[in-house]
Image (cartoon, rainbow, N blue to C red):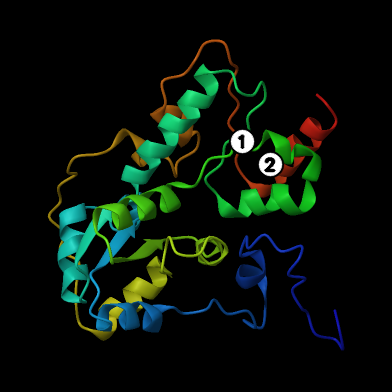
């Protein structure tokens, strides 16, 4: 608090979004990057969307092809599932485990949890698997296959905006589902609802509880623990730092 006003301490913030949710004055706003995405489209470069697996929960009954049809109407070149990047990531996790490169491995694709470890649990940092997120892996794959292209990630999480800024040149801008919904509404574009499930990547499980493990071929030499939520992650990290 400074002069009776709440401020974010950026060096401690993990972009969990809690302040945005609970502020009684609605004083905290999430940066809107729709104009940034429009500028990429207007640049003349092909612009591809990496779509988070959680689209299945956000737009039930709509397949990747349904959503691609709507996004192409906005000017995007094509839409691919971020689960393609998750498949790359899970194979890297499997390699690390198979080679016993670490006895204790913290695996997370959440930028907020990565920031939590980096900023508040430095003694546990050495256990964090040195693997990029599915968003980054997918962005790199798209840009390799389509030289000169731009990539927009669309998903539910505000911390992905910070992640894209931290690792420059991989993802050109990030939109939340809320931003996408408003853009679609402004253009009178609707996402079709075919009612089909479509083909699912095994790595579509990533955003669910224990999803990384569900997508992997597990090595019996290791024990596996699923932890959800910031408070439980903090408790686990404290336990790790204590040597337990």
The x and y percentages for residue 23 are 67, 75
Q: For residue 227, which numbered disc appears in the image?
A: 1
Residue hosting label 2: 233
Circle 2 packing at 10 Å, graded few (<14), some (14-19), many (20+), is some
Marks 2 and 1 close (CB-CB < 8 Å):
yes
* Image quadrant where residue 11 sits: bottom right
Specify the quadrant that holds the C terminus: top right
Residue at image location 43% in from the left, 47% down from the top: 134
| SS category of the residue bearing label 2 | helix
The x and y percentages for residue 112 are 61, 54
Q: Is residue 205 among what the camera can see?
A: no
Circle 1 packing at 10 Å, graded few (<14), some (14-19), many (20+), is some
Q: Residue furthest top?
A: 221
Q: For residue 198, which numbered disc appears in the image?
A: none
* Foreground of the two, 201 or 62: 201
Specify the quadrant that holds the N terminus: bottom right
Residue at image location 77% in from the left, 31% down from the top: 240
Instruction: Report whether 62 appears left or right of 32.
Output: left
* Spatial CA span between label 2 and label 1: 6 Å
Instruction: Report whether 5 appears left or right of 186.
Output: right
Residue at image location 87% in from the left, 89% down from the top: 3
The x and y percentages for residue 225 are 60, 26
| Vertical relation: 70 (above or below) 194 | below
Q: Is residue 131 among what the camera can see?
A: yes
Residue at image location 27% in from the left, 78% down from the top: 41
The x and y percentages for residue 204 are 34, 41
| SS category of the residue bearing label 1 | loop
Q: Earlier in the sequence, mark 2 or mark 1?
A: 1
Instruction: Report whether 244 appears left or right of 177.
Output: right
């Amino acid at each position: 608090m400074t002069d009776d006003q709440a401020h974010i301490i950026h060096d401690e913030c993990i972009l969990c979004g809690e302040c945005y949710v609970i502020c009684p004055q609605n004083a905290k706003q999430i940066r809107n990057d729709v104009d940034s995405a429009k500028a990429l489209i207007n640049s003349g470069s092909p612009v591809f969307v990496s779509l988070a697996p959680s689209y299945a929960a956000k737009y039930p009954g709509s397949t990747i092809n349904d959503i691609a049809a709507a996004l192409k109407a906005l000017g995007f070149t094509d839409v691919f599932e971020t689960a393609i990047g998750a498949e790359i990531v899970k194979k890297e996790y499997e390699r690390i485990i198979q080679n016993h490169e670490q006895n204790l491995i913290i695996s997370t694709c959440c930028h907020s949890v990565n920031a939590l470890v980096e900023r508040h649990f430095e003694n546990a940092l050495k256990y964090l698997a040195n693997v990029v997120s599915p968003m980054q892996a997918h962005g790199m794959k798209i840009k390799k296959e389509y030289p000169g292209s731009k990539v927009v990630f669309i998903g539910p999480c505000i911390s992905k905006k910070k992640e894209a800024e931290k690792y420059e040149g991989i993802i050109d801008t990030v939109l939340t589902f809320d931003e996408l919904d408003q853009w679609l509404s402004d253009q009178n574009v609707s996402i079709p609802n075919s009612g089909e499930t479509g083909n699912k990547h095994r790595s579509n499980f990533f955003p669910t509880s224990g999803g990384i493990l569900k997508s992997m071929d597990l090595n019996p030499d290791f024990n596996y623990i699923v932890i959800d939520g910031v408070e439980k992650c903090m408790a686990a990290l404290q336990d790790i730092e204590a040597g337990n």
